[in-house]
Image (cartoon, rainbow, N blue to C red):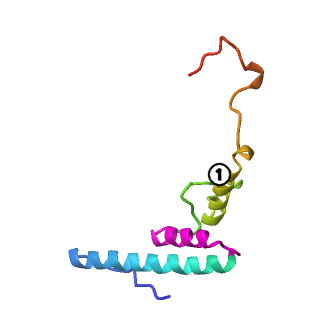
C-alpha cells in the first residue's frame, strides 16, 4: 500500500483540494487493508455479515468500530462484527437482555408517582 506524502509546506486553493483528495484515497486504502486483515482473522462470516461489514467500511468506517457505539466490558468500543452479533442476539432473544428498572416490592403501590 502506497500512501501519499502528507508533508506540504504551503497550500493554495487548488493544492488544498488535491491534499483532501489524497487524504481520502489514503483513508480508503487504509480501511480496505484493515478490512482484508480483519476478514482473515475474524473467522467465519455469514453472507449477510460480510455484506454489511463491507458496506460499513465502504461508507468510510473502521472495522474496529460499530454503528451502535457499543462498548465491551473493558470500556473499549466493540468491533463491528461482535457488536452486530450482540444486536442480532438481542433481537432474537430479548428476554435475555430485559432489565427491571422498578423495584418489584413496590409493584401496585397506588401512591407511586410516575414521571
Q: Residue at x 33, y 80 (%)?
A: 8
Q: Position of residue 114 (x, y in %)?
A: 59, 20
Dot 1 alpha-carbon crowd within 10 angstroms: few under 14, some 14 to 19, many 20 or more: few
Q: What element carries label 1?
A: helix
Check residue 24 for magenta coloring.
Answer: no
Please indicate, yes or no, whether residue 97 appears anywhere in the rendered image: yes
Q: State whether residue 67 is above or below residue 52.
A: above
Q: Quadrant of residue 81?
A: bottom right
Q: State whether residue 55 is above or below residue 75.
A: below
Q: Which residue is drawn at 65% across and 57% down?
A: 88
Q: Which residue is drawn at 56% across and 54% down?
A: 68
Q: State whether residue 66 is above or below residue 20.
A: above
13 horizontally vs 40: left or right: left
Q: Which residue is drawn at 66% across and 61% down?
A: 85
Q: Where is residue 109 in the image (x, y as percent from the top left)?
A: 70, 14
Count of numbered circles on the image? 1
Q: Where is residue 110 in the image (x, y as percent from the top left)?
A: 67, 12
Q: In which quarter of the image is residue 79?
A: bottom right
User: Would you name the residue on which mark 1 appears?
Assistant: 91
Magenta stretch: give its range: 42-61
Q: State whether residue 67 is above or below residue 35.
A: above
Amino acid at each position: 500500500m502506497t500512501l501519499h506524502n502528507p508533508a506540504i509546506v504551503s497550500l493554495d486553493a487548488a493544492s488544498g483540494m488535491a491534499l483532501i483528495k489524497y487524504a481520502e484515497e489514503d483513508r480508503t486504502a487504509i480501511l480496505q487493508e484493515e478490512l482484508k486483515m480483519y476478514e482473515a482473522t475474524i473467522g467465519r462470516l455469514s453472507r449477510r455479515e460480510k455484506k454489511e461489514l463491507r458496506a460499513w467500511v465502504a461508507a468510510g468506517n473502521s472495522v474496529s468500530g460499530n454503528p451502535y457505539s457499543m462498548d465491551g466490558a473493558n470500556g473499549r468500543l466493540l468491533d463491528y462484527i461482535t457488536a452486530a452479533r450482540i444486536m442480532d442476539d438481542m433481537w432474537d432473544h430479548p428476554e435475555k437482555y430485559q432489565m427491571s428498572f422498578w423495584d418489584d416490592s413496590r409493584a401496585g403501590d397506588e401512591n407511586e408517582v410516575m414521571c
